[in-house]
C-alpha cells in the first residue's frame, strides 16, 4: 500500500512533455544538464523522455538512467508492445525506474485518432500494464483526455489497470478543457468508486489552454490526488503545462489551505528556471508568477513605502525562498519619495532634506523619459547635482582587440587609476578570451587585479544607420558584493562594452569610499 496521507509527489515532465513545445527541443547533453538540476531540486519523479520516438530520445533516457541518482526515472510508452520494450531497455541502468504507459479514453480520441472501440482500448490498456509490470514493478497508467471521457468507462478502465498492476493512476486534462469543480468531481468519483483505489496514487496532469492548469492541479490535490505532473516554467505544448514552481510555492505559502508535505528544495527553483530559459531559449514573461523578473520587483510608491516598513505588506513569500538574493525596488515614474530615499541610502549617499527634494525632482524628470531608472542613473544624477560622489576611479586610456574566424581573440588595455591621493598607475595587459568582448573584460580584470562575475550583459542600438550609437549595459558582482550596473555608449560596440564595464567598477569603488 503506497504512502498517501499528506505526502505529495512531484512528477516533472519538463524533459518529455515540456520538450514537446515548439522550439524547446534539447540536445542529449542539455537534457542531462537539466536532469542534474532537477535532482538538486529533489524532484520525486523525472520523466526523462519518450524512448521509442527517436534514437536521441532513447539515448537521453538511457544516460539519465545511468547518471542521475535520487529521483525515480520514468519513460513514456504508448500502450503498444514496441513502446514498452523500448522503455524497458532505456531504463535498465536506473536504480529507481517507472514505466508510464497511456492510451486515450475519450470518445473523440477513440473514434477519430485510435479508430478503436472502448472494449479494444480497455484490452490494450490492461495488456500494456501487464507487460510493463513483468519487467518493472513501478508502472503508471494515464487515461489520455480523461476529462472529456465518459466517467463510467473511465472508472472501468482505471479499475482494470489497477488489477493488472498499475501503481499510479494519472487523470490528465490533456487539452486544458476542464474547470476546478469538474476536475474535483472526477477525482472524488474515481477514488470513491474504483475497487482497490486505496492501493494506488492518483495523479493530476493539466494543460493551461484556459489558464487553469495550476488551479485544477491544486483542486485535484484537495480532492485526493497525491501526485502532480508539471514542468519548470510551465513549458509544454500549446499554452503549456502546470508550472511546477507555482504549485510548490502555493503549497509552501498556504499551508492552512494545502497541508501537504513535499520533498522539494524550493531554493533551487530560480536556478532551474534560469537553466530552462537558457537551454530552450524560451524567455519567461516578466510578470510570470514566482520566477518572472517582476515577481519580487516593486515600482509603485505605495508598494515601495510598505516594503520599506515591512516586506510582508506586499510580499507573501520571500525571494530568498526560491534562491534569489532579495527583492528589487524598481525606480521609475511610479516610485515615491520613500523608495527614492531608500535607494540613495543603499547607494551610500548622505543628503539633507533640501538636497533630497532637489534630487527627487530631477529623478522624476528622468523617470518620465525612461521605463526604468538604473542605479548608475541615480549616481550620475546626484554626482551632477551635488558633486558628492567624487571623481571616477578607473579610466580607460586605450584598448586594442585582435579577433577573427581563424585567430584567438586577444585584448590589450591601458587603464588609469585616478584615485585621489594616489599616484596615477597605468597597467597594460593582453589576454585571450572566448570572444573579443570576453577578452576585453578579462584584460581589464587583469589590469586592475580584480575578479568579477558578469550577471547582466545587454547591447542595444540607440540610433539607426551604419554609424549608429550602441549602448552596452553590464551588471557585475565583485567577490560577494551586490550587483553594480554600468553603461557605456559608443559607435564602436567594443568600446561601449569597455566603458560599461569600468562604469560598473567605478560604482563599486564609490560605495567603498
Image (spheres, grey):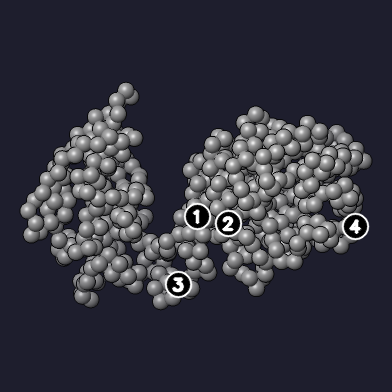
Precedes in sequence: disc 3 or disc 1: 1
Q: CA distance from mark 2 to mark 3?
A: 21 Å
* Label drawn at residue 296: none
Residue indicated by mark 3 = 311
Residue 381 visible at all: no
Q: Are marks 3 and 1 in contact (CB under 8 Å)?
A: no
Residue highlighted by disc 1: 270
- State the image coordinates of residue 14 (x, y, percent, origin top left): 61, 45
Residue at image mark 4: 195
Q: How many marks?
A: 4
Q: CA distance from mark 3 to mark 1?
A: 20 Å
In the rendered structure, find residue 245 and report the number of the disc placed on it.
2
Alpha-carbon distance for marks 4 and 2?
Answer: 34 Å
The tag earlier along the polypeptide, 2 or 3, is 2
User: How far separated are the C-alphas under marks 4 and 1?
Assistant: 41 Å
Crowdedness near tag 4: few (<14), some (14–19) or many (≥20) residues, C-alpha within 10 Å: some
Determine the CA span between mark 1 and mark 2: 9 Å
Q: Earlier in the sequence, mark 4 or mark 3?
A: 4
For the N terminus, which image quadrant? bottom right
The reply to whether discs 2 and 3 touch (Cβ–Cβ < 8 Å) is: no
Q: Secondary structure at mark 3?
A: helix
Q: Nearer the viewer, residue 458 or 512?
A: 512
- Residue occupying image coordinates x 56% and y 59%: 265
For the C terminus, the quadrant is: bottom left
Disc with the residue nearer the chain's start (4 vs 1): 4
Amino acid at each position: 500500500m503506497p504512502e498517501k496521507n499528506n505526502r505529495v509527489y512531484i512528477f516533472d515532465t519538463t524533459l518529455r512533455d515540456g520538450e514537446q513545445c515548439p522550439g524547446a527541443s534539447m540536445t542529449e547533453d542539455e537534457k542531462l544538464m537539466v536532469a542534474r538540476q532537477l535532482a538538486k531540486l529533489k524532484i520525486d519523479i523525472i520523466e526523462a523522455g519518450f524512448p521509442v520516438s527517436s534514437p536521441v530520445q532513447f539515448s537521453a533516457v538511457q544516460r539519465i538512467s545511468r547518471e542521475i541518482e535520487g529521483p525515480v526515472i520514468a519513460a513514456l510508452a504508448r500502450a503498444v508492445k514496441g513502446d514498452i520494450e523500448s522503455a524497458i531497455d532505456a531504463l535498465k541502468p536506473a536504480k529507481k525506474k517507472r514505466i508510464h504507459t497511456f492510451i486515450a479514453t475519450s470518445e473523440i480520441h477513440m473514434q477519430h485518432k485510435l479508430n478503436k472501440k472502448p472494449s479494444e482500448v480497455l484490452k490494450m490498456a490492461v495488456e500494456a500494464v501487464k507487460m510493463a509490470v513483468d519487467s518493472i514493478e513501478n508502472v503508471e497508467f494515464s487515461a489520455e483526455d480523461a476529462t472529456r471521457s465518459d466517467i463510467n468507462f473511465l472508472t472501468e478502465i482505471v479499475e482494470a489497470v489497477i488489477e493488472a498492476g498499475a501503481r499510479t493512476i494519472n487523470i490528465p486534462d490533456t487539452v486544458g478543457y476542464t474547470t476546478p469543480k469538474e476536475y474535483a468531481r472526477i477525482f472524488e468519483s474515481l477514488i470513491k468508486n474504483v475497487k482497490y483505489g486505496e492501493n494506488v496514487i492518483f495523479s493530476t496532469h493539466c494543460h493551461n489552454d484556459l489558464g487553469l492548469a495550476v488551479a485544477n492541479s491544486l483542486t485535484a490535490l484537495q480532492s485526493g490526488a497525491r501526485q502532480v505532473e508539471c514542468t519548470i516554467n510551465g513549458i509544454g505544448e500549446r499554452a503549456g503545462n502546470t508550472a511546477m514552481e507555482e504549485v510548490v510555492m502555493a503549497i509552501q505559502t498556504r499551508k492552512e489551505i494545502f497541508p501537504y508535505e513535499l520533498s522539494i528544495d524550493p531554493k533551487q527553483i530560480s536556478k532551474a528556471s534560469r537553466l530552462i530559459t537558457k537551454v530552450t531559449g524560451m524567455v519567461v514573461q516578466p510578470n510570470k508568477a514566482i520566477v518572472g523578473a517582476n515577481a519580487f520587483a516593486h515600482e509603485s510608491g505605495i508598494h515601495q513605502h510598505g516594503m520599506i516598513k515591512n516586506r510582508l505588506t506586499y510580499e507573501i513569500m520571500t525571494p530568498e525562498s526560491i534562491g534569489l538574493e532579495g527583492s528589487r525596488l524598481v525606480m521609475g515614474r511610479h516610485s515615491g519619495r520613500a523608495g527614492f530615499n531608500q535607494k540613495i541610502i543603499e547607494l551610500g549617499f548622505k543628503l539633507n532634506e533640501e538636497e533630497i527634494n532637489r534630487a527627487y525632482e530631477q529623478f522624476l524628470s528622468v523617470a518620465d523619459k525612461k521605463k526604468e531608472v538604473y542605479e548608475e542613473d541615480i549616481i550620475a544624477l546626484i554626482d551632477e547635482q551635488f558633486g558628492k560622489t567624487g571623481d571616477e576611479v578607473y579610466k580607460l586610456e586605450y584598448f586594442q582587440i585582435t579577433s577573427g574566424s581563424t585567430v584567438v581573440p586577444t585584448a590589450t588595455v591601458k587603464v588609469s587609476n585616478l584615485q585621489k591621493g594616489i599616484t596615477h598607475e597605468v597597467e597594460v595587459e593582453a589576454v585571450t578570451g572566448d570572444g573579443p568582448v570576453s577578452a576585453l573584460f578579462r584584460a581589464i580584470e587583469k589590469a586592475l587585479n580584480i575578479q568579477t562575475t558578469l550577471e547582466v550583459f545587454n547591447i542595444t542600438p540607440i540610433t539607426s544607420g551604419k554609424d549608429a550609437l550602441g549602448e552596452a549595459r553590464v551588471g557585475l558582482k565583485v567577490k560577494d558584493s551586490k550587483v553594480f550596473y554600468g553603461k557605456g555608449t559608443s559607435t564602436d560596440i567594443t568600446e561601449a562594452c569597455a566603458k560599461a564595464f569600468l562604469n560598473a567598477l567605478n560604482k563599486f569603488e564609490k560605495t567603498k569610499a
